[in-house]
Amino acid sequence: MLLADKVAVISGMGPGLGQELAYAFVREGAKIGICCRSQGFLEEVAAEARSRGGEVVALPTDVTDAAQCTRLVDATAEAFGHLDALVNSAYNPGTFALFEDADLADWRLPMEVNLFGALNLIKATVPHLKAAGGGAIVNVNSMIHRKPMPYQGGYATSKAALEGATKMLARELGAHKIRVNSVFMGWMWGPPVEGYVDSAAQGGVSKQDVIGGITKDIALGIVPDDADCANAVAFLCSDLARVITGAGLDVNGGDFMP
C-alpha cells in the first residue's frame, strides 16, 4: 500500500473528487482527518471510509476560519500520533460572469477559500510535519488558469495565486523535508460533471453529444474519473514521490499539455 502508516488531513469532502480522495487514502493504508462544512455529508463519507477499513477523524470545518483549521489538524494528529500529509481540496467556484459584468467583490470568496483557506490549513499543518521530520502537502489546483475559459475569472485567478504560493512554499519548506506540489485537474467524471452533462443535454442534444464536445480535446478521449484523479494525489503524498517538490502534475487525460 502506498500510504501505509501515513496520517493525512484532506479538506473539501464534497461529492466527486473530495470523497474519492478519502477512499483512495484509506485504500492505500492511511489514517485520515477529513472536513467540509456540511455535517451530514461529512458523516456519510466518514461512515463509508470506515466501512472500507479506514480510521477517520471527521470535523465540520470552514477553511476560511484559521481556528477551525487548527482544530481539525490538531485533532487528527492527536488521534493518530503524528501527521504526514495535507491535501487541500476545498474550493469555491465563484460567480460565473464576464469580467466587465462582474462585481469584483464576488472574486473575493474564491480567493478566501481557494487560496487563503489552503494557507490556513498549511499554517496549522507545518508544525506537525516538522515534528515528524517532513511530509507532503498537495494543493488541488485546476486546469482553468492554464486553459482559460470565459465567465470563470475569479476562480481562475484564485487558482493562479495558489500555484504561486505552492512554489514559494516548496522553496521555503524544502529545508524541513516538507514537499509541496500541485495537481492540475480538468474535467472529472463524477457527480458535478454528471449534473452538467444532464443539464446540457436538452433540445435534441444527447448526453453523448455533450460528452463528445468535452472529450474532443482530451488526448485519451475520455473524461477522467474522479477516483483515478485521486490516485495521482495519493502518489504525491507517498514515499515514491519523496524527491518531487514544487511540481505541477497535470491530471486531465491530456486536455492541457504545458
Image: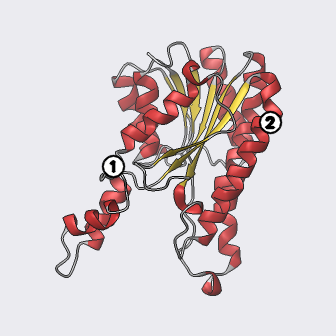
Give the amino acid at mark 2. Answer: Arg
- Callout 2 environment at 10 Å: few (<14), some (14 to 19), or many (20+)? some
Q: Secondary structure at mark 2?
A: helix
> Residue at the bottom extreme?
101
Q: Position of residue 103 (x, y in %)?
A: 66, 81
Point 79% across, 43% down: residue: 168
Residue annotated with mark 2: 171
Foreground pick, 220 / 158: 220
Label 1 CA crowd tier, 10 Å (few <14, some 14–19, many 20+): few
**Count of numbered marks:** 2
Q: CA distance from mark 2 to mark 1?
A: 33 Å
The residue singled out by tag 1 in the image is 220
Give, as a three-letter code, the residue at label 1. Answer: Leu
User: In the rendered image of this protein, does residue 229 appear above or below residue 242?
Assistant: below
Is residue 129 at all visible to an observer of this figure? yes
Q: Quadrant of residue 205?
A: bottom left
SS at mark 1 in the image: loop
Residue 136 point in image, percent of width and height: 65, 28
Residue 57 visible from this viewpoint: no
Residue occupying the point 55% across, 45% down: 89
* Residue 64 screen position, x and y as percent: 69, 51
Please indicate whether residue 194 sits to the left or right of residue 43 in the image: left
Q: Is residue 107 above or below residue 53?
A: below
Q: Is residue 22 left or right of residue 89?
A: left
Residue 24 badge = none
When the figure is inspected, residue 122 is found, relative to residue 81, above or below; the finding is below
Look at the picture and state if 249 lies above or below 32: below
Question: Is residue 162 rendered to the left or right of residue 3?
Answer: right
The quadrant in which the N terminus is found is top left
Question: Is the Cβ of the residue at disc 2 closer than 8 Å to that at disc 1?
Answer: no
Relative image position of residue 246 (x, y in whole percent): 69, 38
